[in-house]
Image (spheres, rainbow, N blue to C red):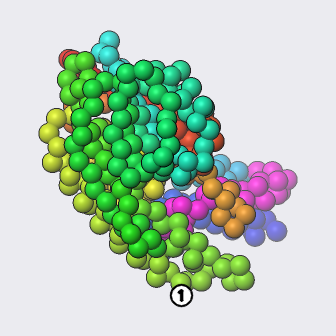
């Protein structure tokens, strides 16, 4: 039994390291994509099984189990523990909120209260129905394009938009909206995005009888190609904008995604930089298994830095709001 337990314990450490490395291929390989968007907590099940036996039979094997647990609880599940927090050094902060409103299935009063109580300056909304009338503080301005919206306490001017196909839907939908916020100490380009999701392709691969049906991965492949093309096109537009830029919204991919790293890795991710914890913003159930992932992000370009970021309280949507405070690298606001 000791030998079998030793093999199982060291094997679990190898499994944990392998699963972590596999994330880097998410959106490049269907299996890695399943791990990227799946319930990563299932990797802790072998730990729960092995731990009592190791404590009872051979405590020397706690080392590989502890090492594996650190990998799983840390980088594999996306734990953020910033070693250095950015200070705005007295500069005025620009407080940003982004939230996917689940096609209008959310608590309107809860969102309005959050915007007011958090002292938000700019709000980015996705899946915001056109007929929805938001309760905003007096004097706020709003831009809309499809189900995307930007609201600001400061003067807001239109900058442009982009539509893209979200497979398996046949008609394009608003995926990018750009506005210019005339903040007290300088204009800021503010963009919101709602990028295509791999959800339908992942659901298509899952099979009740065989668990996985790789022969049905065609939809996932098509989604992946479209998602990469959409990110590339929008990123080019964002890069062409002069001056400080903030991009906030539902990217439909975590930071480990190869698509995210290729096209958005050059921006500063607010939660990755200064957030604490896992920052999961989307909660869903796939085949009865609950999944939490961090797919909503606030990014900043050159000249701006995040100094605070956290997932907000539940407002009734399947996404949690994401709140961030942004300031200039040096000198003047925002």
Residue 245 appears in the figure? no
Q: Secondary structure at mark 1?
A: helix
Rendered position, 40 above or below 325:
below
Name the residue: 32% across, 12% down: 90
In which quadrant of the rendered image does the N terminus lie?
bottom right
Where 5 sits versus 291, above or below?
below
Q: Main secondary structure of the magenta part?
A: helix
Location of mark 1 (residue): 215
In the displayed structure, 309 sits above or below 279; it is: above
Q: Count the marks.
A: 1
Q: Position of residue 276 (x, y in %)?
A: 52, 34
Q: Residue at x 58, y 36 (%)?
A: 108
138 lies left or right of 67: left
In the image, 99: left or right of 298?
A: right
Task: Name the residue: 50% across, 80% down.
Answer: 217
Find residue 224 and report its image quarter: bottom left
Task: Work out which residue is located at the far front of the displayed protein and give it.
Answer: 131
Residue range in magenta is 32-59
Q: Is 250 colored magenta in this rendering?
A: no
Q: Nearer the viewer, residue 303 or 9?
A: 303
Residue 230 image offset from top left, x and y in percent:
31, 62
Q: Is residue 48 magenta?
A: yes
Give whichever of 257, 237 is nearer the camera.
Answer: 237
Please rate how many residues cluster around mark 1, counting C-alpha atoms within 10 Å: few if below 14, some from 14 to 19, many from 20: few
Judge from the rendering whether residue 204 lies leftward or rightward of residue 250; answer left or right. Answer: right
- Residue furthest to the top: 90
x, y percent for residue 295: 48, 51
Quadrant location of the C terminus? top left
The image quadrant that residue 185 belongs to is top left
């Amino acid at each position: 039994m000791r030998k079998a337990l030793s093999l199982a314990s060291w094997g679990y450490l190898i499994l944990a390291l392998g699963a972590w490395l596999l994330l880097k291929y998410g959106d490049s390989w269907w299996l890695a994509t399943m791990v990227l968007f799946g319930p990563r907590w299932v990797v802790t099940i072998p730990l729960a099984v092995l731990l009592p036996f190791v404590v009872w039979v051979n405590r020397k094997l706690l080392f590989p189990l502890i090492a594996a647990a650190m990998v799983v609880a840390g980088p594999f599940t996306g734990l953020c523990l910033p070693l250095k927090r950015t200070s705005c050094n007295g500069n005025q902060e620009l407080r940003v909120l982004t939230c996917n409103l689940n096609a209008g299935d959310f608590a309107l009063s809860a969102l309005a209260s959050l915007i007011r109580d958090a002292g938000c300056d700019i709000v980015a909304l996705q899946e915001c129905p056109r007929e929805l009338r938001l309760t905003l503080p007096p004097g706020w301005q709003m831009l809309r394009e499809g189900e995307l919206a930007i609201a600001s306490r400061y003067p807001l001017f239109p900058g442009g938009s982009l539509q893209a196909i979200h497979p398996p839907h046949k008609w394009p939908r608003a995926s990018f909206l750009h506005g210019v916020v005339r903040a007290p100490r300088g204009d800021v380009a503010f963009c919101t995005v709602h990028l295509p999701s791999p959800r339908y392709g992942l659901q298509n691969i899952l099979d009740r009888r065989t668990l996985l049906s790789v022969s049905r991965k065609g939809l996932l492949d098509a989604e992946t190609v479209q998602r990469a093309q959409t990110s590339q096109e929008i990123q080019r537009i964002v890069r062409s904008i002069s001056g400080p830029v903030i991009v906030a919204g539902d990217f439909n991919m975590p930071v480990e995604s190869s698509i995210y790293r290729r096209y958005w890795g050059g921006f500063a991710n607010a939660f990755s930089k200064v957030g604490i914890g896992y920052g999961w913003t989307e909660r869903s159930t796939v085949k009865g298994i609950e999944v939490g992932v961090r797919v909503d992000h606030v990014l900043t370009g050159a000249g701006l830095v995040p100094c605070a970021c956290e997932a907000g309280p539940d407002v009734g949507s399947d996404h949690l709001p994401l709140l961030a405070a942004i300031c200039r690298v040096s000198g003047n606001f925002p």
